[in-house]
Image: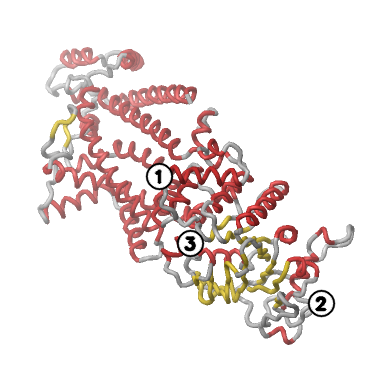
C-alpha cells in the first residue's frame, strides 16, 4: 500500500528577535492508510509544530522553510493559503489537547459542527445536520439530537473531546492529527477514546498521527513510532521493535523513566539535565549534553542511519 | 430569573429614593431659591408669599414627604421657574439628548469595533499602530476643547457645518428628530462626533485587547483547523466572544453619554436636557434637578437591565447562572 501522507525533510523555523528557533528540523516520515503513527517526545520537542505544519497552521514569525508535505500524491507545501484551507478539516483534520478550550464556548454544538461540513461541501444545512448527527453517534454520544442543540459547557471533558473527534471525522479525512487528545482526561475515559479511535481508523482507513509524550499510550495504540528530540526525529520504526530494543540513548532513557517498567523499590531512572533551548544547540547532536555515550564524534550532527530494515536512528553510537 | 428580576426592581427603587434624598438635601444646602426667583426689589411680605406658595416655609423633611407622596403618583413637582410640571419639562427636552446620545453611540460602535478588530488582527502594521495612537489622542483630549476646535475648524474656518442648534426637525411618532433631514444631520454631526470621541477610543482599545486575547485561544485554532474561511473565524468565532465585555461597556457608557452630554450640549447649544439641567442648577430649580437625576437613574436601570438580557443571549453560560439565582 502506498503512503497517504509523506513528510520529507520538513523544516519549520521561527524567526524571533532572539534568533532562529528551529522548531521542526529535518523531519521525515510517511504513513499508510489505516495505520497509526505515534509521534513521541517531551514538551518543546517540536511534535505539535510538526502537526501544525502539516495543517498549514504555522503563524508568523514561523514558516516552513524547507521540505515537502505530500498528501495523496499532491505536494501541498507550496499551495496558496486558500487551497490549503480547503484541505484543512477536509482531507487532513486535527484534534487538540484540551477539550475544554477547543470548542467555542458561545456557539452551539450544531453551529460548530455544521459549519465544518459547509466549509467543504456544497450541501443543504439539513443534509449537513444529518451528517453531524451520524458523526456524534459514531463517537458514542447518546441522544445526538439533544446534544446538537447544547452548548459546550453542558458537556463533560470526555464528551467534549468526543465532539471534537466527531468534528474531525465529519468530512472523512485521509489523515487525522491528534495532538495529545487524551492527556487532559481521566484514565478510564482515555482508554475508551483510544479504543474507539483505533477502531474508527481501522474501519474508515483513516491514517492517524498520535502526538503524545506517553509511551504507554503509544505501546497500546500505534503501529509505527517516531521519537522526536529538539526538532528532529531521533529514532523511528515499528512500535514493538523500538520499544523492545531502543537504539537511541534518548529513547532508552525515556523507556527507563516509565515507572511501570522498573522493579518496585528501586529508584526511578531519569535522563539527567533538561531539554536544551532550541536557540542554543549549535552544531552536533542535540542530546549530547545529556548523553552517557557522548564522544568527540557527537560534535557533528549525526545523519540518520538504518541499522535494521525499517528502522532509523540518528546516533553515532546506536545501542543494541 | 423572576426572583432575580424582582430583587433587581427593589434595589432600583431603593437607589431612586436615596438619590432623591441626597439631591434634596444637597440643593437645600446650596442656598435659598427665593433669593433668585423673586425680584430683588420685592419686600418681605412678597418674599414670604412666594415662599409659602412654593412650600419652602415647611421644614426640609416635610417638604421631602410631600415630594415623596407626589412621586408615588408620578408627580415630581412643578418647576419653580417655569411653573410647569418638572417631569414634563424634562421629557420635552429628553428626545434631543437621546438623539444625540444614540448618534454618538452609533458612531462609536460602527467605527470603534471594526477599527479595534483591525488593530487587533494586525497589531504590528502601520495602520494598526496608527489606530492605537489615534485612540490615545481621543482618550486624552478634553471634550470641551475638542468641541471648540471642531467649531473653529468646520464652522469658522471651512464654513461647512453649522455650530449650534438642532436645525430642521421632522416629527416621528410625536418626537422631533434631526437625523432625517439634511440640515438636521449637518447640525447633528459635530456634537455627536464630539460626544462619541471618548467612547470611540475606549471601544477601539477594548475590541483590540479582546481580539488579541481571543486569537490565542484554542477554539480559534480549532476553527481554523476545520478549514473555515478567515471571515467566518473572525466574524463569528472571535467576534461573538469579544462582544460579551463590549456589550457591557456599551451599556454602561450609554448611560454616561446621556448624563455627560451636558458639556457637549452646552458647547453646541444643543437644546437637550443637559442644557436644561445647567440652567436649573444656576437657578436652584430643585424640582427640575431632582426630576432630571431621577430620570437619569431610571435610564441607567433600564440600560443595565437590557445589557443583562443581551448578555444572556451572547453567553449561554449566563443563562443557566441566572436561573440559579444569579451571581450578580
Tag of residue B246: 1
Badge 2 element = loop
Percent of width and height locating residue B303: 36, 33
Q: Residues within 10 Å of mark 1 (few under 14, many from 20)?
A: some
Q: Which residue position holds label 2?
A: A320
Q: CA distance from mark 3 to mark 2?
A: 42 Å
To the question of a shared chain for discs 1 and 3, the answer is no
Q: CB of mark 1 within 8 Å of CB of mark 3?
A: no
Q: Quadrant of the C terminus of chain A?
A: bottom right
Residue B260 or residue A214, whichever sits in front: A214
Badge 3 element = helix
Q: Is residue A114 left or right of residue B159?
A: right
Q: Which residue position holds label 3?
A: A87
Q: CA distance from mark 1 to mark 2?
A: 62 Å
Q: Is residue B26 left or right of residue A257?
A: left
The residue at 20%/40% (across/down) is B266
Tag of residue B216: none
Residue A187 or residue A292, whichever sits in front: A187
Protein chain holding label 3? A
Amino acid at each position: 500500500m502506498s503512503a497517504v501522507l509523506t513528510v520529507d525533510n520538513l523544516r519549520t523555523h521561527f524567526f524571533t528577535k532572539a534568533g532562529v528557533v528551529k522548531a521542526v528540523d529535518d523531519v521525515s516520515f510517511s504513513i499508510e492508510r489505516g495505520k497509526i503513527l505515534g509521534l513521541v517526545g517531551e514538551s518543546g520537542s517540536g511534535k505539535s509544530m510538526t502537526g501544525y505544519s502539516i495543517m498549514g497552521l504555522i503563524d508568523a514569525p514561523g514558516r516552513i522553510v524547507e521540505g515537502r508535505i505530500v498528501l495523496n500524491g499532491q505536494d501541498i507545501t507550496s499551495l496558496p493559503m486558500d487551497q490549503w484551507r480547503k484541505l484543512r478539516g477536509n482531507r487532513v483534520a486535527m484534534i487538540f489537547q484540551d477539550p475544554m478550550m477547543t470548542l467555542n464556548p458561545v456557539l452551539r454544538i450544531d453551529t460548530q459542527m455544521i459549519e465544518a461540513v459547509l466549509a467543504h461541501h456544497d450541501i443543504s444545512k439539513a443534509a449537513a445536520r444529518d451528517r453531524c448527527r451520524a458523526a456524534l453517534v459514531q463517537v458514542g454520544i447518546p441522544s445526538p439530537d439533544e446534544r446538537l442543540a447544547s452548548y459546550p459547557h453542558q458537556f463533560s471533558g470526555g464528551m467534549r473531546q468526543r465532539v471534537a473527534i466527531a468534528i474531525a471525522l465529519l468530512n472523512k479525512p485521509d489523515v487525522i492529527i491528534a495532538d495529545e487528545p487524551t492527556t487532559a482526561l481521566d484514565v478510564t475515559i482515555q482508554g475508551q477514546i483510544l479504543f474507539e479511535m483505533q477502531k474508527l481508523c481501522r474501519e474508515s482507513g483513516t491514517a492517524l498521527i498520535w502526538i503524545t509524550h506517553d509511551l504507554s499510550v503509544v505501546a497500546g495504540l500505534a503501529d509505527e513510532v517516531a521519537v522526536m528530540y529538539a526538532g528532529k526525529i531521533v529514532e523511528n520504526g515499528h512500535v514493538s521493535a523500538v520499544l523492545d530494543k531502543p537504539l537511541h540513548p534518548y529513547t532508552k532513557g525515556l523507556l527507563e523513566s516509565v515507572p511501570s517498567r522498573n522493579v518496585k523499590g528501586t529508584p526511578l531512572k531519569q535522563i539527567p539535565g533538561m531539554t536544551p533551548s532550541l536557540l542554543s544547540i549549535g552544531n552536533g547532536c542535540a542530546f549530547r549534553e545529556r548523553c552517557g555515550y557522548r564522544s568527540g564524534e557527537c560534535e557533528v550532527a549525526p545523519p540518520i542511519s538504518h541499522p535494521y530494515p525499517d528502522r532509523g536512528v540518528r546516533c553515532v553510537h546506536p545501542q543494541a | 430569573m423572576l426572583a432575580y428580576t424582582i430583587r433587581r426592581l427593589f434595589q432600583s427603587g431603593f437607589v431612586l429614593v436615596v438619590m432623591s434624598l441626597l439631591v434634596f438635601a444637597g440643593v437645600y444646602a446650596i442656598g435659598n431659591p427665593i433669593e433668585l426667583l423673586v425680584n430683588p426689589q420685592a419686600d418681605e411680605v412678597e418674599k414670604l408669599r412666594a415662599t409659602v406658595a412654593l412650600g419652602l416655609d415647611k421644614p426640609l423633611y416635610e417638604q421631602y414627604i410631600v415630594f415623596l407622596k407626589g412621586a408615588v403618583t408620578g408627580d415630581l413637582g412643578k418647576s419653580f421657574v417655569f411653573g410647569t410640571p418638572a417631569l414634563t419639562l424634562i421629557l420635552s427636552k429628553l428626545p434631543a439628548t437621546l438623539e444625540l446620545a444614540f448618534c454618538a453611540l452609533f458612531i462609536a460602535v460602527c467605527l470603534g469595533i471594526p477599527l479595534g478588530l483591525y488593530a487587533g488582527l494586525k497589531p504590528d502594521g502601520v495602520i494598526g499602530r496608527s489606530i492605537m495612537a489615534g485612540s490615545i489622542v481621543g482618550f486624552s483630549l478634553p471634550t470641551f476643547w475638542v468641541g471648540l476646535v471642531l467649531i473653529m475648524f468646520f464652522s469658522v474656518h471651512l464654513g461647512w457645518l453649522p455650530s449650534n442648534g438642532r436645525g430642521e426637525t421632522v416629527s416621528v411618532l410625536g418626537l422631533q428628530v434631526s437625523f432625517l433631514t439634511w440640515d438636521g444631520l449637518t447640525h447633528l454631526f459635530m456634537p455627536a462626533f464630539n460626544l462619541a470621541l471618548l467612547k470611540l477610543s475606549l471601544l477601539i482599545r477594548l475590541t483590540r485587547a479582546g481580539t488579541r486575547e481571543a486569537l490565542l485561544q484554542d477554539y480559534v485554532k480549532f476553527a481554523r483547523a476545520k478549514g473555515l474561511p478567515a471571515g467566518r473565524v473572525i466574524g463569528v468565532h472571535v467576534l461573538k466572544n469579544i462582544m460579551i465585555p463590549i456589550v457591557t461597556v456599551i451599556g454602561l457608557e450609554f448611560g454616561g453619554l446621556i448624563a455627560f452630554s451636558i458639556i457637549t450640549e452646552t458647547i453646541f447649544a444643543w437644546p437637550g436636557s443637559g442644557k436644561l439641567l445647567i440652567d436649573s442648577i444656576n437657578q436652584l430649580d430643585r424640582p427640575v434637578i431632582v426630576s432630571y437625576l431621577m430620570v437619569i437613574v431610571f435610564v441607567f436601570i433600564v440600560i443595565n437591565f437590557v445589557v443583562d438580557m443581551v448578555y444572556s443571549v451572547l453567553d449561554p453560560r449566563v443563562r443557566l447562572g441566572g436561573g440559579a439565582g444569579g451571581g450578580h
